Image: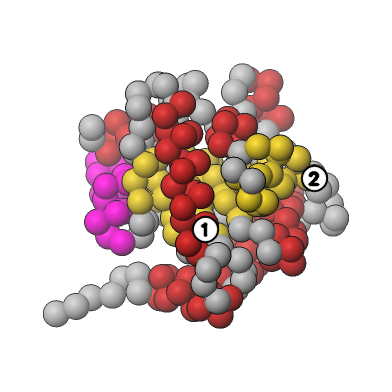
Amino acid sequence: MSAFDKVCAARAKGRPTGMDFINNIFQDFVELHGDRRFGDDKAVVTGIARLNGMPVTVVALEKGHDTKEKIARNFGSAHPEGYRKALRQMQLAEKFGRPVICFVDTSGAYCGIAAEERGQGQAIAENLMQMMTLEVPVVSILIGEGGSGGALALAVADEVWMLENSVYSVISPEGCASILWKDSKKIKEASECLKLTADDLLQLGVIETIIRESGKDFSKTYQKLNQRLWATLTKNRQLLQKELVAKRYGRFRKFGEIFE
């Protein structure tokens, strides 16, 4: 598949969303709402659950399925209160020693005037800073689109995984084409240039794992993720808190290193 084909697959109608992964991987999920500042952003789903008996905190960017739900979820583009809600739950997870799992699927953070007025940039920056120092294991999984800072705000983790047909990029292919060629129709060329596929990013060291998909039947994918998450979180919980944070910090510091 070409890079553009991967973009189309990540955006495909009927592809499982964050809630589908939560409902099929975890047990006893209880959703928690609000950021205690402004409101409850439905583009971000947060709560506590059990992973084979292990208490965890789960955060997901949720696009919705039908048109009505997509509108209610703002097509997965979160407002500042959504990121603040996510951060509040991650800080509670740290307080009670629960690992954090994030599911990322968004074309980007909402860029409307209201979001800017309520501090969109600051909310994303606070997530980046605070997630870097969380003293509990954190795993982030790209399940569809991973667009710009809106995705990165939930992807500062010990390990970042991508589903086989997901994408992760600093900008959408349409946006890239508009900037580089002044022509949004050059989306195929932009998709190739951005190196946004799971294979590209694994080679660049931006992610740790590619989760292979089994066609349209995601039952095997859910099972695979359940087992891999259990093994990874069990291993990372054995690390000292300072060691865990230092390892996460080092992961990001090595990006872009050039060896001669």
The numbered dot on residue 124 is none
Q: Is residue 164 above or below residue 68?
A: below
Instruction: Identify the image quadrant of the N terminus.
Output: top left
Task: Point out the stretch of residues depicted in magenta.
Answer: 185-205
Instruction: Identify the image quadrant of the C terminus.
Output: bottom left
The numbered dot on residue 33 is 2
Dot 2: element: loop
Upstream in sequence: badge 1 or badge 2: 2
In the image, residue 257 lies at what x, y percent? 28, 75
The residue located at (35%, 27%) in the rendering is 214
The secondary structure that dominates the magenta segment is helix
The residue located at (34%, 46%) in the rendering is 210
The numbered dot on residue 234 is 1
Location of residue 8 (image quadrant): top left
The amino acid beneath tag 1 is Thr
Q: Is residue 203 magenta?
A: yes
Q: Is residue 200 above or below residue 165?
A: below
Q: Residues within 10 Å of mark 1 (few under 14, many from 20)?
A: some
Spatial CA distance of label 1 from label 2 is: 28 Å
Q: Residue furthest front?
A: 53
Nearer to the camera, 136 or 60: 136
Q: Is residue 146 visible?
A: no
Dot 1: element: helix
